[in-house]
Amino acid sequence: MKILAVDDDPIILELLSEVLRVVGFTNLTLCSSSSEALALVERAEVPFDCFLLDIQMPDMNGIQLTSAIRAMPRHAKTPILMITAMSDRTYIDNAFAAGASDYITKPFEIGEVHARLRLINALVQEWKQKDDRNPVYNLGEPASIVTNDDLSKPLSLLDIDGFIEYLALENYLLQMSRVSLFGMSAFGVVVPDMERTFSASSVFEFESAITDIAEAMSDTLKPRQFLAAHAGGGQFVCVLSGEGQFAPTDFQASLRGAIREMDLHFCDGRPMSFNPVVGPDISLQLKSSRGVASALVQAMLDAESIARDPSTRDVETPSSFKRLLGF
């Protein structure tokens, strides 16, 4: 795995170099400034697989550097691990909103860095294998028909305000559980019948629809402070921060109205019709670090239960949720 570490403290860079060498990550490039890092990233013939970024740097801080890296198409999903002394909630919020994948506070432990990089490396290798099995289609070639794998995988929607990857949302909550979950809650959004709606459609049509729904969610949630993610198929999960009452039924009505105003259509001109269901919000402030990840799944299950039958209490766990739970 090709790694770029950026920190203006030479002692930290030396420590990171030794730590990564000990745990087997030797393909490492070190930078002492954001401007130097951007120059390296732009001219690299072989793209980097992972970035380790400090936040406090003089010319451009690590959060701004994260945004700049995410703006590069080939690094839209490259894992970015923040390694910083900044533990305030504002820095964590801003880092993940800018596109950070994970967050470690200094002083760090070798075991923690090793564990995070091991997970990142496994994810990178999985992506590379999928790319090898699924070559990119060129313009002019027939559009690929959506498969069950296409329908079930979470999509990266990093160009939409407030949206981050699902794993990043989990990592965000794990980090926040060490700081404060006060005033935070989660809720799920389910769009029924997505598999049936797109059973004979193209991947482009399905991913465009998911993107449009996410944009409607983002616009409807503003100006609230939130982070959200697509969890696969027609499932989304959102985390709200700060004070203020959240009314799921009001949000659902506004979201459906926003989607109707988009006037969505398939490529052949047929209209798309979506009626997303919003579940109740779940308070996170009493959750443990282990409980926050399961709370995200529970939020989606609650929305799925309402979508299927408002009077149903015992609902079989959908396969996509089983995947997220690791079953």
Image (cartoon, helix red, strand yellow):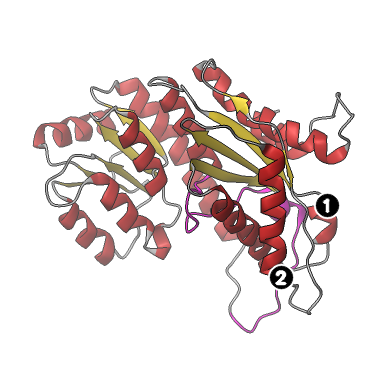
Q: Horizontally, is 186 left or right of 252 in the view?
A: left
Q: Horizontally, is 266 left or right of 214 in the view?
A: right
Give amino acid for label 1.
Answer: Asp
**What residue is rendered at 59% in x and 81% in y?**
139
**What residue is rendered at 60% in x and 35% in y?**
246
Secondary structure type for disc 2: loop
Residue 103 image position (x, y, % from top left): 36, 33
Q: Horizontally, is 315 left or right of 15 in the view?
A: right
Label 2, on which residue? Answer: 263
Q: Main secondary structure of the magenta part?
A: loop
Residue 143, quarter of picture:
bottom right
Secondary structure type for disc 1: loop
Residue in front for this viewpoint, 161 or 169: 161
**What residue is rendered at 89% in x and 29% in y?**
311
Residue 87 image position (x, y, % from top left): 29, 27
Task: Report the label total.
Answer: 2
- Asked whether residue 283 appears in the rendered view, the answer is yes
| Range drawn in magenta | 139-165
Give amino acid for label 2.
Answer: Asp
Q: Which mark is residue 193?
A: 1
Residue in front for this viewpoint, 299 or 175: 299
Residue 83 image position (x, y, % from top left): 28, 34
Q: Residue furthest bottom?
A: 140
